Amino acid sequence: METFKQQYPIHTDITVAWGDMDALQHVNNCVYLRYFEIARIDFLNKLNLFDTINSKATGPVISENNIRYKRPVTFPDTLSVGITISDIKSDRFVMNYSVFSHAQNAITTTGMSKVVMFDFKTGQKATITEPLLSALKANSQTE
């Protein structure tokens, strides 16, 4: 777990609920999108970016999601979802997720979301603001 925390300084802990499991007695595949959303919102909150995003009536929208299931997760468990940023462009970026199971002491799931900045007034893509760009670069993967 310590290695995970070092690799993902911004991470979100999520308690697996009994209702997250499906008939096969593991967390249902679609629940991971909710886990990613919880971590994404927490990530933006921890960087204090909602004031910046909302003040301009622009915000992030998801254009694509991808999930890779490596190991099943069951109740009870606590998951830590770590996020890194990659592929930063003028109007978009990629959020990369790693889901660490405390019960298994292992990464069980990985994924990514392509995030596009959107101007809700004009209905068009928007440029990433400087405060958001700086925060994204500070949390980006070095490849």
Image: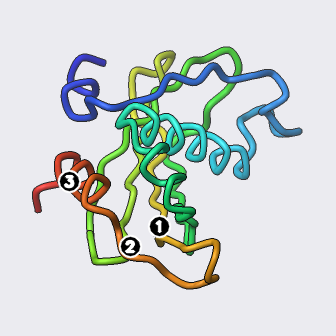
Expressed as whole percent of the image width and height from the top left, the position of residue 75 reads 71, 20
Residue sitting at the far front: 55
Label placed on residue 115? 1
In front here: 124 or 107? 124
Residue at position x 54%, y 41% in the image: 41
The answer to which of marks 3 and 2 sits earlier in the sequence is 2
Residue at position x 39%, y 57% in the image: 95
Cα–Cα span, label 2 and label 1:
6 Å
The answer to which of marks 2 and 1 sits earlier in the sequence is 2
Q: Are marks 3 and 1 in contact (CB under 8 Å)?
A: no
Q: Which residue is mark 2?
A: 92
Residue at position x 26%, y 29% in the image: 9
In front here: 32 or 128? 128
| Colouring rule applied to residues | rainbow
If the image is split into quadrants, where does the N terminus sit? top left
Expressed as whole percent of the image width and height from the top left, the position of residue 80 reads 46, 27
Cα–Cα span, label 3 and label 2:
13 Å
Whether residue 8 sits left or right of residue 66 in the image: it is left
Q: Which residue is mark 3?
A: 134
Q: Please, what secondary structure does the residue beneath circle 1 have?
A: strand
Expressed as whole percent of the image width and height from the top left, the position of residue 70 reads 49, 47
The amino acid type, in three-letter code, at marker 1 is Val
Whether residue 27 sits left or right of residue 62 in the image: it is right
Expressed as whole percent of the image width and height from the top left, the position of residue 10 reads 33, 32
